[in-house]
Amino acid sequence: MVERSELHEGMPVFTHRGEKLGHVVEVTDEELIVEKGLLVWRKDYAVPLDDVREIIADEVHLLHGPDSLLSGPREIDRSSRRTTH
């Protein structure tokens, strides 16, 4: 399992096949919040830390693909999340 201390805001997040999903916007004790999409179509998803396969060259690589964002990790309401930008 990846240590929480290895994760930080701004890290790019990739699927198990190397497709870029988005980037980390927040790290909690149990999950990382991934922002996916551009401008108006942005959505935030909570990804359990257990779903992180590894960190390579300051990039987060997950155990699954983008379809798992809809069936596994839950979508986060952007208005309920504290934003720093």
Image: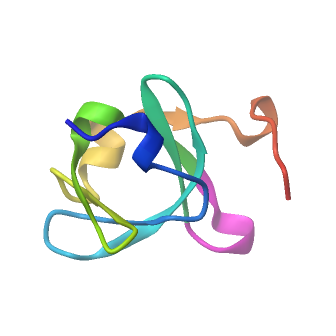
Rendered position, 63 above or below 72: below
Instruction: Write the residue at 17% across / 52% down.
Output: 64
Instruction: Write the residue at 59% across / 35% down.
Output: 76
Q: Position of residue 30 (x, y in %)?
A: 42, 23
Instruction: Confirm whether the magenta stretch covers residue 9.
Output: no
Instruction: Write the residue at 49% across / 23% down.
Output: 29
The number of callouts visible is 0
Residue 21, quarter of the rendered image: bottom left
* Colour mapping: rainbow
Which residue appears farthest toward the top when viewing the image?
29
As drawn, is 15 to the left or to the right of 28?
left
Which residue appears farthest toward the front when viewing the image?
5
Please identify the quadrant where the C terminus is shown: bottom right
Q: Is residue 71 visible?
A: yes
Toward the viewer: 8 or 61?
Answer: 8
As drawn, is 3 to the left or to the right of 1?
right
Q: Is residue 46 visible?
A: no
Toward the viewer: 17 or 6?
Answer: 6
Q: Position of residue 69 (x, y in %)?
A: 34, 47
Q: Magenta segment, which residues?
A: 37-43
Q: Position of residue 19 (x, y in %)?
A: 27, 76
Toward the viewer: 17 or 53?
Answer: 53
As drawn, is 52 to the left or to the right of 26?
left
Instruction: Write the residue at 46% across / 40% down.
Output: 5
Rendered position, 66 above or below 4: below
Please identify the quadrant where the N terminus is shown: top left
Residue 60, quarter of the rendered image: bottom left
Rendered position, 22 above or below 69: below
Q: Position of residue 10 (x, y in %)?
A: 59, 64
